[in-house]
Amino acid sequence: MKKSTFLVLLFAAAQALAQGYPAKPMRLIVPFAPGGAADLTARTLGDRMGQLLGQPIVVDNKPGANGVVGIDYVAKSPPDGYTLLLTDRGSLAVNPSLYVKLAYDPLKDFAYIGIATDGPYVLVANPKLGVSTVKELVALSKAKPGTINYASYGVGSMAQLNLEAFNHALGTDMLHVPYKGAGPAAQATVAGETGVTIAAVPAVQGFIKEGRLKALAVGSDKRFAVLPDVPTMAEAGASNDILVPTYFALLAPAGTPPAIVAKLNAAMKAALADPAVADRLAGVGLVPDGSTPEAMRESLKRDVPRFAELVKKIGIKPE
């Protein structure tokens, strides 16, 4: 059976289980500022899913505190399928290690719909830093330790964890400057407030094309089609494991009826199988995933202790 036929049948079966839903527009909360990969995934996916479900999906950005503000909002929303969440790997897997009293429990307070897209990172630098390769960045940092700042999306964000792993693995001494999201971190690097950052492609692709940021390497096993001249970390002389990729996933409040979750998962998979959606995501370096709720749960269960160990190793103290 062809994948497209299977997805159509899956979508039809889920529809039968959740007849009558949705009967009104849905809200898709993105707990980060506009302009990043989470926002682009939400708007691209939400538009097509809304068409499939017969009701619009309205994207609502609620940034703050590494995603805590928006995520907690969804956790406390009615479990009726009308308030959904699209968030990233770090806000789910890392935040439990950053806050003594986190407002939500990522393993208990949500119904998982599935991982929508995977987002490998690209390492970028302000052109005025004068580096064009990873080796040149490492050499400059070692020659002038403590003089290069890097932008992250907040304390404990995937950007900080990855760039501290970079420091540790390559012997550099870049200093952390937190911002409120991938978009603001990219803007800060463009403006020269910081010398370096990492981001999924959507947050920096335009700046790279305009020459306002220099792409040094991608954290992927192979080069991006949209950045064909940018080497992988391995090609740049480091390890691809240094830049662990993020993902962007769909969730609903815990207690959402399984039939509604199944319908949303089927709609997500059908949307990702749409060539127009897949092409748009691939065109900005995002890889369609479309996992099951169960696969997402297992991934998160592995990630939480894994990142807790890394947070402790870096020396970040929970707030």
Image (spheres, rainbow, N blue to C red):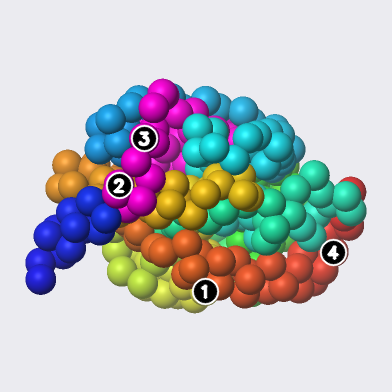
Pointer 4: what residue?
315
Ranked by sequence position, the earlier of labels 1 and 4 is 1
Which of discs 2 and 4 lies nearer the camera? The answer is: 2
Ranked by sequence position, the earlier of labels 2 and 1 is 2
Q: CA distance from mark 2 to mark 3?
A: 9 Å
Q: Amino acid at mark 2?
A: Gln
Percent position of residue 178, x then y: 71, 41
Pointer 1: what residue?
241
Pointer 3: what residue?
20
Q: Amino acid at mark 4?
A: Gly
Ranked by sequence position, the earlier of labels 3 and 4 is 3
Ranked by sequence position, the earlier of labels 2 and 4 is 2
Task: Name the quadrant of the N terminus.
Answer: bottom left
Span highlighted in magenta in the image: 14-43
Q: CA distance from mark 2 to mark 1?
A: 40 Å
Pointer 2: what residue?
15
Secondary structure of the residue carrying numbered label 2: helix
Tags 2 and 4 touching, CB below 8 Å: no
Q: Is residue 189 left or right of residue 6?
A: right
Q: CA distance from mark 1 to mark 3?
A: 46 Å
- In the image, residue 34 lies in the stretch drawn in magenta: yes
Q: Residues within 10 Å of mark 1 (few under 14, many from 20)?
A: some
Q: Amino acid at mark 1?
A: Asp
Residue pictured at 81% horizontal, 49% vertical: 102
Tags 2 and 1 touching, CB below 8 Å: no
Q: Residues within 10 Å of mark 3 (few under 14, many from 20)?
A: few
Secondary structure of the residue carrying numbered label 4: loop
Q: CA distance from mark 1 to mark 4?
A: 20 Å
Q: Amino acid at mark 3?
A: Gly
Up/down of 155 relative to 246, above or below: above
Q: CA distance from mark 3 to mark 4?
A: 50 Å
Which of discs 3 and 4 lies nearer the camera? The answer is: 3
